[in-house]
Image (cartoon, rainbow, N blue to C red):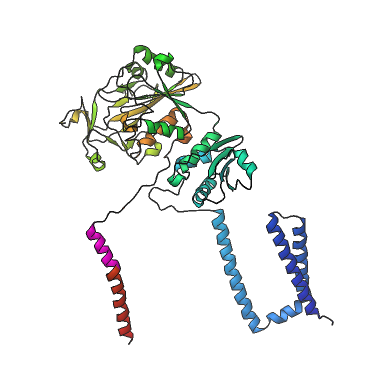
Amino acid sequence: MKWTRNQWAEFISTVGVIAAVGGYIIYARQSELRLPSQILFIAGGVLFLAGIVIGFGAIVKFFSRRSSQLGTNTTILALGVLLILSLLNFVSYRHHKRFDLTTEKLYTLSDQTKKIMRGLQQDVTVARFAKNEDPQLADLMKEYRNASSHIKFEDVDPTQKPDVAQEYGATHMGDVIVAAGTKHQPVEASGLEGNPSEQDITTAILKVTRNTVKTVCFVTGHGEKSLSDSDATGYSLVDQGLKKEGYNTNSINLVKENGVPSSCDIVVIAGPTQGYFPEEAGLVSKFLDDGGKVLIEVDPQTDPKLSRIFEAWNINVGDNVVVDASGVGRLFGTGPATPLVVDYGDSPITKSLQGGMTFFNLARTVSIADKAKSDPQAVELLKTSERSFTIPKLVREVQYNPKTAGPLSLGLAASRTVGEKSARLVVIGDSDFAENQWLNLQRNGDLFFNTIDWLAQDENLISIRPKTQTARHITLTEGQMASLQWLELFFLPGLVVIVGMGIWWKRR
């Protein structure tokens, strides 16, 4: 049987299509355009074009028919729609955008994490070792990968790849480990149901990418807040928060140590209730004179006897108690002795706090003593409302005193150059704002940790920390429950029946 020209054209084109499809299948399996795939692609294209050339006359005759033209128009329209959808999909893939409509932005990385991701200079791998995938963690890691090209995430089955599990140090199913270079850091999960949270992962990334770990030392021996105290007035949450941000913490006694230990990068004096000896104040002054960094929190109605430091740094710590008569604190269950701050100075510490609120339970004024002096450079950080004022001491009945009316400064940050170092000092007229019972209220925690970051010269960490999900429950009375059940069982079905009967009657 002798084939016609058109039959040969159809055969050659078919072989060309088969060859091209075979080349694509090999390419898809190998994920790389190797020589066999290239040969099949080229051969398929050549054969397909040859078939078109050989059968060109038949093709022209076919498309000259009216039915063929209608079919062609339909095909072109379908291909056009498919092309548009493909382009939209490509654009959405290259320019990824998600919208987080939750109140706390639970599915959006915090500004702090984004800053850290933008500052990465090396590749970081986050590996989860388990047989099954974790969709929640996978979604979270997509946000990390969108924030930085240095982030890689992979699910590893330790039963199939025991060598990888051994390399990363994974010992249990579900372990999540962050690796950068030769450093490996297990993620300590603190999220719901034991899942890693954003803060857990960011902390692990900080630990494997930081070259040095700075130590924050808290002075003891004068009734200061304790890092080990988990009661309402303790600082155990401060201790946990600093460690999550990659700092070491330590408690020191200036008398026993005969000075500030060399391992301390930052010294914190948190609410002493007893006065320092002159020699101790001198040791803190020497630490600052050598380019050290210090945070001093001074509560009202106490005398820590640190005036030597305050005078040297042009700081006026008022012997008073600040009262807020605006009444705003009542909305949050606080009284006039807990001033509310919504006005912040121009400092890296408070830049991310603009628009937020901080609370200070019993505070005193801390301001610049002589604003004409340029050394040290100082910024008043926290300003109360115009309806605030000061009183000498806390009493049961308080009368408004316009002579001491606000805005009042509750804290300041100062710095001066010492050789090649930058000595930094922050003084706040309250230590209660960072207690366990106040730390997570509004922006109190951000204020404290931002202060430590500024003192440590880790400005890239200064931002708003990851938020936790707020539990929201609706409590209904018995009457409300009965009304809801009546609505569900009778009203809605009855409404559907009445509407249906009305439509039937109209059409009858």
Does 403 sit left or right of 163 as displayed? left
The residue lying at 64 percent from left, 77 percent from top is 72
**Above or below — where is 90 with respect to 194?**
below
Please state the total of marks drawn on the protein image.
0
Task: Give the image quarter of residue 299.
Answer: top left
Relative to 166, is 316 above or below? above
Q: Nearer the viewer, residue 208 or 456?
A: 208
Question: Left of 419 or right of it: where is 276?
Answer: left
Q: Is residue 326 left or right of residue 432?
A: left
Tell me where residue 210 appears, x and y as whole percent. Answer: 54, 32
In percent of width and height, residue 367 lies at 31, 26
Residue 246 visible here: yes
**How far across and how far down the image is residue 67, in percent?**
64, 83
Q: Residue at x 24, y 27 (%)?
A: 321
Residue 505 on image: x %, y %: 30, 84
- Specify the quadrant that holds the N terminus: bottom right
- Looking at this view, is 302 or 376 the one in front? 302
Q: Residue furthest top?
A: 279
Magenta stretch, residue numbers:
477-488
Q: Main secondary structure of the magenta part?
A: helix
Q: Quadrant of the C terminus?
A: bottom left
Please, which residue is most extreme toward the bottom here?
508
Examine the structure image and report whether residue 485 is included in the region drawn in magenta.
yes
Residue drawn at point x = 26 percent, y = 30 percent: 362
Which quadrant of the view contains residue 395? top left
Considering only vertical position in the picture, is 136 above or below 213?
Answer: below
Q: Is residue 348 visible?
A: no
Residue 157 lies in the magenta-colored region: no
Q: Residue at x 35, y 19 (%)?
A: 221
- Residue 184 lies in what quarter of the image? top right
Q: Is residue 506 left or right of residue 215?
A: left
